[in-house]
Image (cartoon, helix red, strand yellow):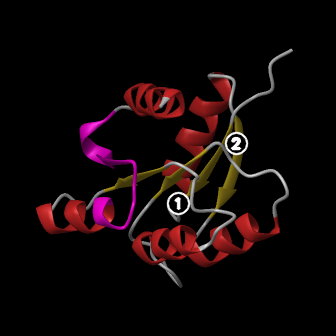
Amino acid sequence: MEQKKKIMIVEDDVFVMDIYQTKLAQEGFEVLSATNGMEGLKKLKAMTELPDLMLLDILMPYMDGLEMLAEVKKEEKLKNIPIILLTNLSQKNDIDTGMGLGANDYLIKSHFTPSEVVEKIQANLKK
């Protein structure tokens, strides 16, 4: 039997988190979660089996998504995890910053349905 792909969601909005946890679980993914970048980074560093991909919000308390992204890319153990930024920030400079820090994709929450986000996840997992 094929092992479920693990997706980590780092999102401080409980409602958004719930939508994506439900959708990803329905699509057969194992879902891990953290409510801010600091918690997400701590969980990642403690894991023996890393997630196959991470959905990362930008605007969060304690450590935002861009700070977390920069930290993940510095860590030898973590730097190859594909990361999709899923955020409400739609300014070109935010997108350029996120992609420049090493994100694999940048999705603006209001422009994508959960089903479309799942399609993006599957496309990134195939790369």
Q: Which residue position holds label 2? A: 31
In the displayed structure image, the side of residue 113 where residue 24 appears, left or right: right
Residue 99: image location, x then y, percent: 30, 59
Q: Which quadrant: the N terminus?
A: top right
Say which residue appears at 62% left-offset and 22% top-offset: 27
Where disc 1 sits, the SS reads: loop
Q: Is residue 58 magenta?
A: no
Q: Residues within 10 Å of mark 1 (few under 14, many from 20)?
A: many
| Residue farthest left in this picture | 92
Between disc 1 and disc 2, whose residue precedes?
Answer: 1
Image mark count: 2
Q: In the rendered image of this protein, does residue 122 appear above or below residue 93?
A: above
Q: Which of the pair 114/66 is nearer the observer? A: 66
Q: Position of residue 61 (x, y in %)?
A: 49, 80
Q: Which residues are magenta?
A: 99-112
> The disc labelled 2 sits on which kind of residue?
Val
Residue at the disc numbered 1: 11
**What whole-number distance in Å separates the C-alpha atoms at marks 1 and 2?**
13 Å
Q: Residue furthest bottom?
A: 62
Q: Is residue 87 above or below residue 12?
A: above
Q: What residue is at 39 percent from the left and 48 percent from the top?
A: 104
Q: Secondary structure at mark 2?
A: strand
Q: Amino acid at mark 1?
A: Glu
Q: Position of residue 26 (x, y in %)?
A: 65, 23
Whether residue 101 appears in magenta in the rendering, the answer is: yes
Characterize the local packing of mark 2: few (<14), some (14-19) or many (20 or more) Cα atoms within 10 angstroms.
some
Q: Residue at x 50, y 60 (%)?
A: 13
- Residue 107: x and y in percent read 31, 46
